[in-house]
Image (tube, rainbow, N blue to C red):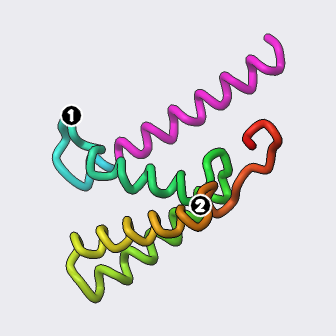
Amino acid sequence: MSRTRKVDAYTFAFGSGLAGIAGCTLSLLGSIGPSLGTYYIVDAFMVVVLGGVGRLIGTVAGALSIGILNTALEFGTTATIGKVLVFSIVIVFLQWRPLGLFAIRSRALD
C-alpha cells in the first residue's frame, strides 16, 4: 500500500470516527430522525467560512468566536434575535475579509 493510500485510509477512518461520535452526541440532545442535523448546518457552514476554508486553526477560531458571540447576544436578547445578529455580523465581517480569519495564501486561488 502506497503512502498516499495509507494517509487517505487513516483520514477516512478518523473522519468516520468523528462523525460517529457527533451522531451519538446529537442523538442525546433531541429526537432521532432524518432532520436531526439540519438545525446545525447553518452554524457549521458559518464556522468554516468565517475561519477560512481549508484552515483547521481558522475553523477552531471561528467556532469559538461564533459560540461566544452567540451566547453573549442571546443573554441580552432572545435566541432567535441572537442568531440573526450573529449571522448579520458574520456577513459584515466577510464583506471586510472575504477569505475569512485565516486565509490560504496561494497564487492558484488569486
Q: Is residue 94 left or right of residue 9?
A: left
Which quadrant of the figure contains the N terminus?
top right
* Callout 1 amino acid: Pro
- Determine whether, in the image, residue 100 is placed left or right of residue 41: right
Q: Residues within 10 Å of mark 2 (few under 14, many from 20)?
A: some
* Foreground residue among 10 and 68: 68
Residue at the limit of the structure toward the bottom, as seen here: 76
73 vs 99, left or right, is left
* Region of the chain picked out in magenta, as a range: 1-25
Q: Residue 99 placed where, x, y %?
A: 63, 55
Front position in the image: 45 or 109 = 109
Residue 23: give x, y in percent of width and height.
Answer: 36, 42
Residue positioned 66% across, 22% down in the render:
9
Q: Which residue is mark 2?
A: 60
Which secondary structure dominates the residues rendered in magenta?
helix
Q: Amino acid at mark 2?
A: Val
Q: Look at the picture and state if 50 lies above or below 27.
A: below
Q: Position of residue 68 (x, y in %)?
A: 45, 76
Q: Quadrant of residue 20?
A: top left
Residue lying at 74% horizontally and 26% vertically, measured from the top left: 7
Return the disc, 1 or 2, that comes first in the chain's sequence: 1
Q: Farthest residue toward the top?
A: 1
Residue on which the image places disc 1? 34
Instruction: Give yes or no for residue 50 being in the magenta stretch.
Output: no
x%, y% of residue 105?
79, 50
Question: Is residue 4 found inside the magenta-colored segment of the image?
Answer: yes
